[in-house]
Image (cartoon, rainbow, N blue to C red):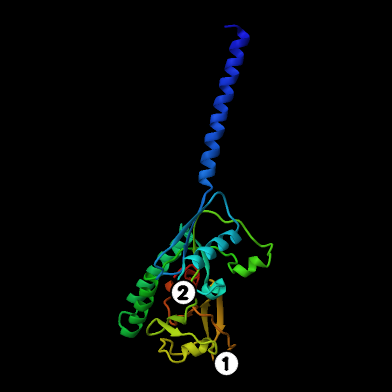
């Protein structure tokens, strides 16, 4: 074999090795960039759907895929997706809970346990805290991704359409007919929704733990937006809550070590899936 032939052969082998390495790296990269989407209509859903995207889809693609699956596979549904899906209650979540949200959940759980001990001589207060603890334990929490999910928003040609990726869950629920009231109330309650009722109207018939009245409550709307509603007679600004919202009545007389509880619980509820 001449020196020239040897060099040519070595070059060809080198190119083949490089091509193989590029192919392997490309395949691994493509696999790593797959986005898996689980679509569900809620905790009572008899079926969930799974979609895999190569790479990172736009939010509009995620919404359209979810809408298509829910409307095509549902029974006894009206033709237009607006009649089927309650878009204000839609949520896009990351199935992998972040360290911050996990720590927030653990912290709230520990603080409620400590509050139960602090109020061990008051059966009514202890029962109220236990009711809230049960509500949280029965809930599902995942990291909410803050994006617009209304199908019509993207049909209108919005330029706000970010990429998303990872292991995702898309919640496309039917419209609920209740509003949750939790926190410093004798019992966590799912009150019947009425478009004519403001926030205070949901509180009036309930027994609360607050002897000095309620000035403000936290409201987590079904899209995860956190609001403060003024409900006292002297500062009330009547506001409506949407079906599926959660009204959190803050605790009064908390020990100094648990002062953050009234803020931590609403922030946690923003990541509640169902």
* SS class, disc 1: loop
Residue shown at 39%/67% (left/top)? 46
Question: Label 2: few (<14), some or many (≥20) within 10 Å?
Answer: few
Picture coordinates of residue 133, whole percent (x, y): 37, 74
Determine the image quadrant of residue 164: bottom right
Q: Are marks 1 and 2 in contact (CB under 8 Å)?
A: no
Picture coordinates of residue 244, whole percent (x, y): 49, 77
Q: Is residue 134 above or below residue 93?
A: below
Q: Spatial distance from mark 1 to mark 2, Cα to Cα?
A: 48 Å
The residue identified by callout 2 is 76
Picture coordinates of residue 179, whole percent (x, y): 47, 81
Residue shown at 46%/74% (left/top)? 76
**13 and 271: which is toward the camera:** 13
Q: Is residue 191 visible?
A: yes
Residue shown at 63%/70% (left/top)? 152
Q: Is residue 111 above or below residue 238?
A: above
* SS class, disc 2: loop
Q: Is residue 171 visible?
A: no
Q: Is residue 228 left or right of residue 248?
A: right
Residue 206's disc is none
**76 and 129: which is toward the camera:** 76
Picture coordinates of residue 80, whole percent (x, y): 57, 72
Q: Is residue 104 above or below residue 96?
A: below
Question: Label 1: few (<14), some or many (≥20) within 10 Å?
Answer: few
Which quadrant of the figure contains the C terminus? bottom left
Residue shown at 43%/87% (left/top)? 210
**220 and 244: which is toward the camera:** 244
Residue 234's disc is 1
Which quadrant of the figure contains the N terminus? top right
């Amino acid at each position: 074999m001449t020196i020239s032939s040897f060099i040519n052969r070595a070059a060809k082998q080198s190119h083949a090795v490089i091509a193989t390495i590029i192919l392997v790296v490309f395949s691994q990269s493509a696999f790593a960039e797959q986005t898996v989407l689980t679509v569900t209509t809620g905790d009572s859903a008899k079926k969930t759907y799974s979609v895999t995207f190569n790479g990172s889809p736009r939010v509009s693609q995620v919404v359209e895929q979810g809408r298509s699956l829910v409307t095509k596979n549902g029974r006894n549904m009206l033709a237009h997706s607006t009649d089927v899906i309650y878009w204000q209650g839609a949520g896009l979540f990351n199935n992998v809970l972040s360290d911050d949200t996990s720590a927030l959940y653990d912290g709230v759980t520990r603080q409620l346990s400590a509050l139960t001990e602090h109020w061990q001589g008051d059966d009514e207060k202890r029962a109220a805290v236990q009711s809230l603890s049960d509500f949280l334990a029965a809930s599902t929490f995942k990291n909410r991704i803050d994006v617009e999910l209304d199908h019509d928003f993207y049909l209108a040609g919005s330029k706000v359409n970010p990429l998303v990726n990872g292991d995702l869950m898309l919640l496309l629920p039917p419209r609920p007919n209740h509003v949750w009231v939790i926190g410093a109330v004798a019992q966590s309650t799912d009150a019947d929704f009425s478009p004519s009722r403001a926030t205070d109207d949901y509180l009036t018939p309930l027994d609360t733990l607050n002897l000095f009245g309620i000035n403000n409550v936290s409201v987590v709307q079904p899209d995860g937006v956190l609001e403060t509603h003024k409900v006292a007679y002297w500062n009330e600004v009547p506001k409506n809550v949407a079906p599926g919202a959660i009204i959190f009545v803050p605790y009064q007389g908390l020990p100094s070590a648990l002062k953050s509880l009234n803020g931590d619980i609403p922030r946690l509820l923003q990541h509640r899936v169902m």
